[in-house]
Every structure is written in structure tokens, then in C-alpha cells.
Image (cartoon, rainbow, N blue to C red):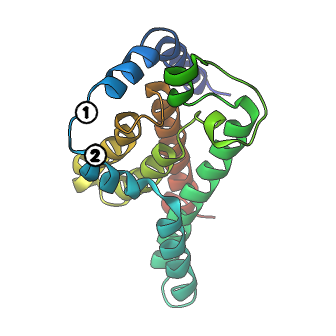
């Protein structure tokens, strides 16, 4: 494992620990106590973190262009793989650590990790929507670098909608965004940039 990867992992883990200990609860309380009357917009935005639409579209793209166009086939395979692999990893982590969601803290003061549980209210970490949003939009940002600022901004808005709606902590979306983004980055190198 290279030094850069080790340093990156240390920074990511340190950031998650910091958010968990010092910001998560206060931010959750803030959004719980303030009604901004734009929840319908936020609910619409958060739907862009649903993986099934991207998985179906990218799988169809890979199948349709399997023999017709190597470039388009690889793009479909790349987007599908980025979302699927990061999503599987996110779900494994969710079940393994079983972190209580913000409503459990707001209503019952339950904060932290239960450990190995499949329940909805204990699968907060990492955010699946944030994972999907960053896997998809970082994939597009790498494929279309001129649009990367807009794409990364939109991924961030989608991820943050989960905190706004009170279903995730800030550290959840940070972890999900990191997982989705890094998965897309590394798969880009092997599927698009330098396919074997």
C-alpha cells in the first residue's frame, strides 16, 4: 500500500471521527428544529441518489453497445460498476457497524453503533444515497472533465439533502461520498483510461 493511500485513509478516518464526535449531533438537532418549508424540493433532489435508475440505464447501455461500440460499452460498464461496487460495499458496512439514524438520537437519545443489524433505523453509516450520487457524478466528471465543477456540486447537493431531511448525519454522507468517489476514480483507471 503506497504512502499516498495510507495518508488519504488517515485523513478520511480522522475526518469521520471528528464529525462523529463534534458536529453530527448538533447539525442533526439544527435540521430537526428548523422547518425551512422547502422539503418538497429537497425530497426531489434526494431522489437523484437512488441507485436503481443509474444501474438499469448503465446496464442497458453496456448490453446495447457490447458489440457495436467498445467505447460506449466501457462507459456503460464503468458507470454500472462504480455504482454497483460502491453500493455493495456501503451495504456491507451499514450492516456490520449498524449506526443509529438521527431520529433515534432525536427521539430516544440513541447515538452510536449497535453492530450487525439489518434494520432501517440502524443503517445510517455510510449514506447509500451519498455513495450513489458521488459514484455516478464523479464517473461523469471523469468522463466529461469540463463539467466536473457542476457535477461535483450537484453530487454534494444530493448528498447533503440526506442531512437536511434528517435521515443521515454529516459523517454518514462524508463517508458515502468518499466511498462512491474513490470507487469511481479507481475504476476509471482500469476500465476507461487503461483497459486491459
Residue 40 seen in the figure:
yes
Q: Residue at x 49, y 36 (%)?
A: 178
Q: Which mark is residue 165?
A: none
In the image, residue 53 sits, relative to residue 169, either above or below, namely: below
- In the picture as drawn, the residue positioned furthest to the top comes out as 22
State left or right for residue 18 relative to residue 161.
right
Residue 12 seen in the figure:
no
Q: Quadrant of residue 10?
A: top right
Secondary structure beneath label 1: loop
Q: Which residue is mark 1?
A: 35
In depth, the one of 6 and 159 nearer the eye is 159
In depth, the one of 144 and 126 nearer the eye is 126
Q: Give residue 167's position: percent from left, percent from top.
A: 47, 37
Q: Residue at x 34, y 35 (%)?
A: 164
- In the picture as drawn, the residue positioned furthest to the right comes out as 116
Mark 1 and mark 2: Cα distance apart in space: 8 Å
Badge 2: residue crowd in 10 Å (few <14, some 14–19, many ≥20): few
In the image, residue 26 sits, relative to residue 191, either above or below, namely: above
In the image, residue 72 sits, relative to residue 161, either above or below, namely: below
Q: Give residue 125's position: percent from left, percent from top.
A: 59, 33
Secondary structure beneath label 2: helix
In the image, residue 75 sits, relative to residue 117, either above or below, namely: below
Image quadrant occupied by the N terminus: top right
State left or right for residue 147 relative to residue 60.
left
Circles 1, 2 touching at the beta carbon (< 8 Å): yes
Q: Give residue 110's position: percent from left, percent from top.
A: 61, 19
Q: Residue at x 27, y 52 (%)?
A: 40
Image quadrant occupied by the C terminus: bottom right
Q: Residue at x 46, y 34 (%)?
A: 173
Badge 1: residue crowd in 10 Å (few <14, some 14–19, many ≥20): few
Q: Quadrant of residue 118?
A: top right
Q: Which residue is mark 2?
A: 39
Amino acid at each position: 500500500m503506497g504512502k499516498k493511500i495510507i495518508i488519504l485513509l488517515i485523513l478520511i478516518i480522522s475526518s469521520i471521527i471528528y464529525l462523529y464526535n463534534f458536529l453530527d449531533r448538533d447539525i442533526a438537532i439544527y435540521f430537526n428544529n428548523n422547518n425551512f418549508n422547502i422539503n418538497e424540493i429537497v425530497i426531489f433532489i434526494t431522489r437523484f441518489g437512488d441507485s436503481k435508475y443509474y444501474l438499469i440505464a448503465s446496464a442497458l447501455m453496456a448490453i446495447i453497445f457490447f458489440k457495436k461500440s467498445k467505447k460506449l460499452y466501457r462507459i456503460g460498464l464503468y458507470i454500472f460498476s462504480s455504482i454497483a461496487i460502491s453500493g455493495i460495499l456501503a451495504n456491507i458496512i451499514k450492516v456490520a457497524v449498524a449506526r443509529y439514524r438521527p431520529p433515534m438520537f432525536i427521539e430516544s437519545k440513541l447515538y452510536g453503533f449497535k453492530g450487525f443489524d439489518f434494520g432501517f433505523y440502524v443503517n445510517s453509516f455510510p449514506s447509500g444515497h451519498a455513495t450513489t450520487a458521488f459514484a455516478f457524478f464523479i464517473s461523469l466528471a471523469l468522463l466529461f472533465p469540463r463539467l466536473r465543477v457542476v457535477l461535483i456540486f450537484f453530487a454534494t447537493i444530493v448528498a447533503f439533502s440526506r442531512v437536511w431531511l434528517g435521515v443521515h448525519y454529516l459523517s454518514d454522507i462524508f463517508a458515502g461520498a468518499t466511498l462512491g468517489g474513490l470507487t469511481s476514480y479507481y475504476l476509471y483507471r482500469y476500465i476507461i483510461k487503461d483497459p486491459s
